[in-house]
Image: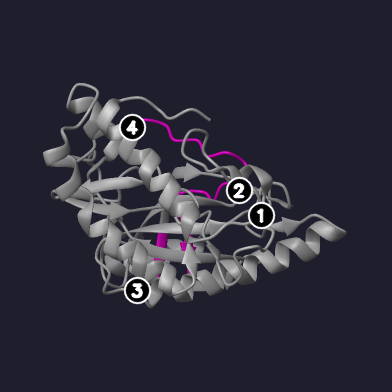
Amino acid sequence: MRREKIKYNVSTENEVKRMNKNYCPYCMAPVPEGESCSVCKLTSGKYVPSPHHLPPGTILQSRYLVGRVLGEGGFGITYIGRDLRLDLKVAIKEYYPMDRATRNASASLEVTSFIGPSAISFQRGKQKFLNEAQVMARMDKQQVIVGVRDFFEINNTAYIVMEYVEGITLHELVEQRGGKIAPDELFPLLEPLFHALSTMHGNGLIHRDISPDNLMLENGRIRLLDFGCAREASRGTETMTIALKHGYAPIEQYQQKGQGPWTDLYALCATIYYALTGKVPPQ
């Protein structure tokens, strides 16, 4: 089976050679030279990133190796990655508001913001993105919440390096249980999340995107993922950019104002409803 090689630029290639290792762009597992990945079996395939995505093999800060895209939303792109210094798998979140910026990675890795009011909004959003990373980093003792390892600015945008969580989502667990989870299994599983959310809200941060897809079970422990929609909640009546998931978003997210800790509580209760019944709540 032919192993797909990551194509590096000169500086990237030197960094990887210094580590004397090759990595699978799909799962970031070490791959012996000339062999296929024994972990995910996918390195014989052909991964083609979208033009605005960072190419696999990109190295950020001479440390973080970028692999394939894990997910993408209105505010950013999440990649699987590898911390070459610590030799750890990580998740890398890139600030990329699709309605305010563009990029053609084949020409340049730099993100270009639109002109006019969009440029101002882009810069404000980038600063909030970095501020939220600082808030998340201060919650490193909350094991339920995905941990932040680093954050920085480069390529005219910003990045957050987070721990990589492996497991199954709550949505997948519901499917495994035949469409619903029994209360005596569900509530002990979710209980640690309640204290973590209280701490998060106490630090002035709201998630705004709690759903069965953003809760993951890692070794039987619940973890809260994807802070791409997170915003500071210093003023509950402050107008905020709309970011919602139908069935799990309360009315204030449709109105784009009045959001606060209660916004997360509604989404959590909607998630519990889905897990118990197998039905998505009405929009």
Residues under numbered marks 1 and 2 in contact, where contact means CB atoms less than 8 Å apart: yes
Total tally of numbered discs in the picture: 4
Query: Which residue lies under the disc numbered 4?
Result: 274
Q: Range of the magenta residues? A: 44-65
Upstream in sequence: badge 3 or badge 2 = 3
Q: Is residue 200 magenta?
A: no
Label 3 to label 2: alpha-carbon separation:
26 Å
Disc number lying in front (3 or 4)? 4
Judged left or right of residue 273, residue 13 is right
Residues under numbered marks 3 and 4 in contact, where contact means CB atoms less than 8 Å apart: no
Identify the element where label 3 is drawn.
loop
Residues under numbered marks 4 and 2 in contact, where contact means CB atoms less than 8 Å apart: no
Q: Residue at x 80, y 57 (%)?
A: 118
Label 3 to label 4: alpha-carbon separation:
28 Å
Label 4 to label 2: alpha-carbon separation:
20 Å
In the picture shown, does residue 107 fall above or below 185?
below
Asked if one can make out residue 91 in the rendered structure from this viewpoint, the answer is yes
Q: Nearer the viewer, residue 163 or 220?
A: 220
Asked if one can make out residue 68 in the rendered structure from this viewpoint, the answer is no
Question: Looking at the rendered structure, which numbered label has been put on residue 252?
Answer: 2
What's the residue type where badge 3 is placed? Met
Upstream in sequence: badge 1 or badge 2 = 2
Q: Residue at x 50, y 62 (%)?
A: 10
Identify the element where label 1 is drawn.
loop
